[in-house]
Image: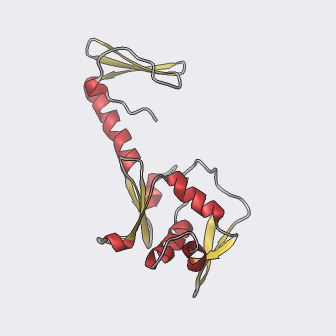
Amino acid sequence: MLPLLIEFFDGDEEPDGGVRVSTQGETIVVTIGDQTHELSREAARGLQDAIGDAMTRKREFLHTAGEHREDGKYVVSRRSADSAGNTKVFESFANLRRLFERLPAEFTADDVSRTGITGSRRHMLVRHFAEHPAFDCSITTRNPLTVRKTATSADPGSEGESDSATAD
């Protein structure tokens, strides 16, 4: 996704995907496809902040949390945990998605441990898969903690985040 670096923008450019950003005096003109929007610098800064918040926000679920960091990494943690022993850092959300896809149709923490993840992090990940809307699965038993994938699967590139109000 193209970040809007409006405050540091110094001319016309067309980076990718038919997105064009230019200035006309104190107005920022953003063209995406065939739609053009004019924004004041104040409105553009607000948009930039909103995009930044959406790209780096932390979502809390019942037992776990997921955080998109500025460096592109995705961090799974125990909700309200403050030690590194309660987190697992992935290079990207796509890497977490690939881990989920490699797991069997029904899996436990033991299945997660076969991927090299150890200790309490494996249970945390099983719970996170069940809690996060991007992963089409649910907990079937609590002892041992077992998750079953449903017949349909979410879009592999999607994170299922259409309503941020459901995150809390």
Q: Which residue sits at x=54%, y=52%?
A: 94
- Res 150 → quadrant: bottom right
Q: Position of residue 84 (x, y in %)?
A: 33, 69
Up/down of 100 relative to 57, above or below: below
Kindly tell me whether residue 135 is visible in this rendering: no
Up/down of 15 relative to 92, above or below: above
Q: Position of residue 128 (x, y in %)?
A: 50, 68
Farthest residue in the right direction? Answer: 151
Residue 27 versus residue 134: which sits nearer the camera?
134
- Res 135 → quadrant: bottom right
Up/down of 66 relative to 119, above or below: above
23 lies left or right of 68:
left
48 lies left or right of 19:
left
Q: Position of residue 110 (x, y in %)?
A: 58, 79
Q: Which residue sits at x=27%, y=11%?
A: 25
Q: Position of residue 156 (x, y in %)?
A: 62, 51
71 lies left or right of 92:
left
Kindly tell me whether residue 53 is visible in this rendering: yes
Q: Which residue sits at x=52%, y=70%?
A: 116
Farthest residue in the top direction? Answer: 25
Up/down of 113 relative to 37, above or below: below
Q: Which residue sits at x=64%, y=60%?
A: 101
Colour treatment of the image? secondary structure
